[in-house]
Image (tube, coloured by chain):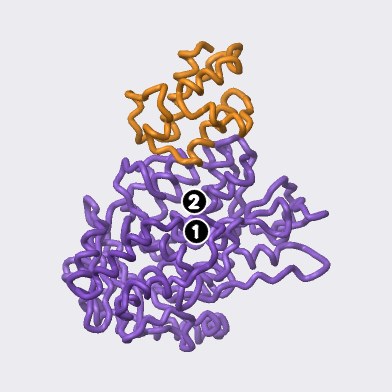
Chain colours: A purple, B orange
Amino acid sequence: MSGLSAGVRLAYYEKKVCILERHTTIGGLNSFYRLRRRNYDVGLHAITNYAEPGTKRGPLSKLLRQLRMTWEDFDLRPQLRSSIVFPGCRLEFTNQFNDFVQQVAEAFPDQIDGFQKLVERIAGHDALNLQRATVSARQVVSEYIGDPRLVDMIFCPLMFYGSATPRDMDFSQFVIMFRSIFHEGFGRPFEGIRLILKKLVRHFRSLGGDLRLRAGVSEIRHREGRATSVLLDDGTEIETDNILSSAGAAETMRMISSQQPPPEAVPGDISFVESISVMDKQPSSLGHDQTIVFYCDSPEFHYERPDVPVDLRSGIICSPNNFDYSEPLEDGRIRITALANPHYWMNLPEEQYVAEKDLWNQRIIASAVQHIPDFREHVVDTDVFTPRTIRRFTGHLNGCVYGAPDKSVNGQTELSNLFLCGTDQGFLGIVGAMLSGITIANRYLLR
Amino acid sequence: MTADQIRQVILDILERIAPDEDLSDLDDARPFREQMELDSMDFLDIVMELRKMYRIQIPEEDYPHLNTMAGTVEYLTPLLKDVAVSA
């Protein structure tokens, strides 16, 4: 989506743009597929940074302006309500930030003053200043909040929805995530991510852009510090003046042909297994009206690559049905996502892989139904993705979802006309990915 | 183009960049930024739209001339005097 957004900007200003995608369909980490006559979304649980149509400020409004697209193009419907559930404590939140403040005040009366001061600190923080030094978000938050459980409950959704680093985040990333999830909130188009992707592609092509699927780049050729052409998997060579890569930092470095091995960027290893259940009932008819439930069953929240195949102690339960649509979705869906060990899933022999997927799917659901009504007897179809699935379809090493722990915020590489955009450039989430493509295109290719 | 035509061109550009803004009461003497949400990214889009439409290059040191509608029209008038209105 970062590449498509960059492509729209460049094509709009009459640059000759060709977007190359190895997969048979668009979207990368946020995509869609059809399986046994049903539509599925990948990646997207919800779009963060929700804003009411017509809002003049904020990331979503900026994004639409830059792309010359309309609020109707994205058709975002707001969430109903979401919650963060820890042992003995639950905090609900909506797209109205005051609801969350009130929940914190009720559940943690002795912490609310500190929480309010933290909110002021966040409001005054310039998170987009790329010159700022890295600061531990946990350290900053602990200055304001003394109860470690509240600290963990605030971090849980923010890390689950965007942290490339285990255990802690940079404070600027924390601020971006806090605003995008708690202040702005969640939305989803009725038709899912495919709506936005298809609109983007149509827009790109109408501006004269060229999008090629099944066209993976195997090599970036260069001379005297400048990229000169890309070599495709099928042997085609395309000459170019500039390259913008959304393939990931480490993944892109590996494409640079060189006598010496290229400098090794370190890929991240935070990845997930997701269980997707299709039901013959709407979740609300079982009494479940939450949009997203972030749960943690252990006293402390552990956001890191687990030593076991799947970390069952915490997870995210998303029901795409529970947004404020004008009509219900065709069938009920429950998606449950939990941290996984990429190395375990990559190395299994195929037969065992299939069996393990099934086994861990059942375990993930069993831990999730402690927090939502037991939906298992209504399941009519199931799909599961693992880090291996993510690597297969996106090429991201380790099946990594939020990119490398070290972001290359200026987007530059060792080649003067090769730039990075997307999750490894630094902005998070779907809106972040799109803004990343726009920012890098503006800065280097449109000036 | 006349000054009035140039003003309309700028209004059309602003309308494209910021479709959620109401521009009917725009005060030509006051900075755009005091009257609408316009950040540096949007501002650069005005420059790039003009380049795309009329092939004019505006050097960065001249950007302060474009802070208000009156300043923009005055700055563009000599540059666009022999140019026809484009669709």
Q: Are marks 2 and 1 in contact (CB under 8 Å)?
A: yes
Q: Residue at x 77, y 52 (%)?
A: A226
Q: Quadrant of residue A14?
A: top right
Local secondary structure at mark 1 = loop
The image's mark for residue A435 is: 2
Point out the image quarter for the C terminus of chain A: top right
Residue type, label 1 = Phe
Q: Residue at x 56, y 45 (%)?
A: A7
Mark 2 or mark 1, earlier in chain? 1
Q: Is residue A364 above or below residue A320?
A: below
Q: Is residue B84 left or right of residue A175?
A: right
Q: Residue at x 46, y 88 (%)?
A: A308
Q: Is residue A411 above or below residue A371?
A: above
Q: Is residue A443 above or below residue A159?
A: above
- Other residues around mark 1 within 10 Å, as few (<14) / some (14–19) / many (≥20): many
The image's mark for residue A427 is: 1
Q: Is residue A346 above or below residue A76?
A: below
Image coordinates of residue A206 in percent, x first then y, are 52, 37
